[in-house]
Amino acid sequence: MRRTLTFIAPRQVEIREEPLPPLGAEDVLVQTVCSAISAGSELLIYRGQFPRELADSHDALSSGLNYPLAYGYACVGRVIETGPCVDPEWVGRFVFSFQPHTTHFIARPEALFPVPEGLAPEAACFLPNMETAVNLVQDAAPILGERVLVLGQGVIGLLTASLLTEFPLDSLATADHFDVRCKALGLHSFDSSQPDFRDQVRTCLPDGADLTLEVSGAPSALDDAIALTRFSGRIVIGSWYGEKRAALDLGGAFHRSRIQLISSQVSSIAPELSARWDKARRFEVAWQALTRIHPERWITQRFALERAAEAYRLLDERPHETIQVMFDY
């Protein structure tokens, strides 16, 4: 038997128990060790703010979403059994898989990502977010000496900013609503909830940012990005807003600003890179980055799967207390 977290209606989750299907000859059985909650996309699911039909989506995880729904994509577990056609050396390996929050799952070995030796399972749970951060930085293409602003210091924002610290930038600033996130990386960070937030940023970036990355998940932050990016600058939009809407001020300086708005989403490779890059190469870069950055330091809460309702209420009602919330099995 396995237990799987299921979203059944806005702000309602339950743990459903079901028998595992038979193990196929070319399959492995994985017992989950830990899985990470995405405070962005999963809260949209939890709150019922996701578009119900995304028929043209390139992202299989976010297409055709409807309740009841088992959703999640950051599972790490240990292989405990193999089918007769699978190398038995798989048994005992830690692997990552894009799976919902579940105690056990069956998969083909080619769909699994072996966790590199020495990397903690908790760190491996950050692989999809790190791949997203790598994609954002590749799409942003930072230039030597640029002034960069990252709006949003949730996990995606922290990982993105961490990668950007490795570039020879002139300056790097971040912003978030919550103090615990502003302090997580130790960079110059602004409180975006303050009424004079834009004025504060302009004291650091008087001419505006050359490059701004919007990863807050808040549509209103895109308006901040437009206001704080300089003439001919670039704004990379990595947030998934779901059904959330906000008015943008495009009638003022933006009209003559020649600012580029760049959509960035991890399910595809930028066309200008696709001749040289594929998903496998990007995953390799993401694994290497995890060993350098150690994102497990940002795990703020751990819950047993049976306490899932409590975990999502925390993220929904008291996000200022959280960075990364994890399920332990």
Image (cartoon, rainbow, N blue to C red):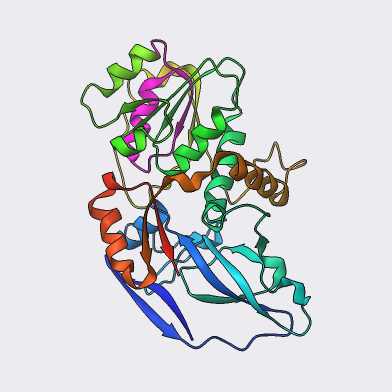
Specify whether residue 211 is painted magenta: yes
The residue furthest front is 118
What count of labels does the image hold? Answer: 0
Where residue 298 sits, quadrant-wise, is top left
At x 34% / y 12%, what residue is drawn? 203
Magenta segment boundaries in residue numbering? 205-229
Q: Nearer the viewer, residue 38 or 119?
A: 119
The relative height of residue 318 versus residue 230 in the rendered view (above or below) is below
The relative height of residue 257 versus residue 68 in the rendered view (above or below) is above
Where residue 184 sits, quadrant-wise, is top left
The relative height of residue 211 versus residue 22 in the rendered view (above or below) is above
The residue furthest left is 195
- Residue 10 can be seen in this image: no
Where residue 175 sits, quadrant-wise, is top left
Point out residue 180 in the picture as x, y percentages from the top left corner: 32, 38
Q: Nearer the viewer, residue 11 or 298?
A: 298
- Residue 160 can be seen in this image: yes
Point out residue 55 in the picture as x, y percentages from the top left corner: 50, 62
